[in-house]
């Protein structure tokens, strides 16, 4: 009948993510949280993702590094962090 004539353009390739596939990065100290990346940024192995600073002395007490190449799926956005709190979740690059 040819009633509808609609052009469909390319879209995005979707992927289902499982919680087990995400790499969680947790803080090793408490203090002020200074992130260097945000959600959906690409990261490389060894890249510094965030600093944790002692609020009384201003000294960096910990740094968070990317354990592997991937994309930041989740990034904490509060300025204060407690020890062992989740800072980032990274997923392997999906579509190359």
Image: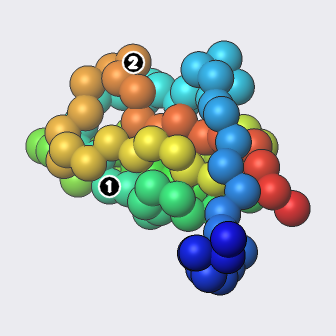
Residue at figure coordinates x 56%, y 27% from the top left: 24
N-term-proximal mark, 2 vs 1: 1
Question: Residue at the right extreme?
Answer: 96
Question: Residue at the front extreme?
Answer: 1
- In this view, the residue in front, 1 or 84, is 1
Whole-angstrom CA distance, mark 2 to mark 1, is: 16 Å
Residue at figure coordinates x 66%, y 17% from the top left: 20
Secondary structure found at label 2: loop
- Residue 78 x/y as whole percent: 20, 44
Does any portion of residue 84 appear in the rendered image? yes
- Residue 67 x/y as whole percent: 72, 39
Does any portion of residue 45 appear in the rendered image? no
Q: Decide: is 45 above or below 67.
A: below
Instruction: Estimate how packed mark 1 is, as few (under 14), some (14 to 19) or many (20 or more) residues with alpha carbons within 10 Å.
Output: some
Count of marks overlaid on the render: 2
In which quarter of the view is residue 47 placed?
A: bottom right
65 left or right of 30 in image:
right
- In this view, the residue in front, 21 or 28, is 21
Residue at figure coordinates x 25%, y 33% from the top left: 81
In which quarter of the view is residue 96 placed?
A: bottom right
- Residue 21 x/y as whole percent: 70, 25
In which quarter of the view is residue 52 placed?
A: top left
Instruction: Estimate how packed mark 2 is, as few (under 14), some (14 to 19) or many (20 or more) residues with alpha carbons within 10 Å.
Output: few
Residue at figure coordinates x 40%, y 27% from the top left: 86
- Residue 69 x/y as whole percent: 77, 51
Position of the N terminus, as image quadrant, is bottom right
41 left or right of 13 in image:
left
Q: Decide: is 53 above or below 83.
A: below
Secondary structure found at label 1: strand
Q: Which mark is drawn over residue 34?
A: 1
23 left or right of 76 in image:
right
Residue pointed to by mark 2: 84
């Amino acid at each position: 009948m040819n009633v509808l004539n609609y052009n469909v353009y390319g879209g995005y390739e979707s992927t289902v993510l499982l919680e087990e596939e995400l790499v969680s990065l947790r803080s090793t100290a408490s203090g002020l949280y200074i992130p260097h990346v945000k959600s959906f940024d690409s990261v490389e192995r060894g890249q510094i993702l965030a600093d944790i600073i002692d609020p009384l002395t201003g000294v960096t007490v910990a740094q968070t590094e990317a354990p592997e190449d991937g994309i930041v799926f989740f990034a904490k956005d509060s300025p204060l962090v407690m020890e062992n709190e989740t800072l980032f979740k990274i997923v392997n690059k999906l579509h190359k």
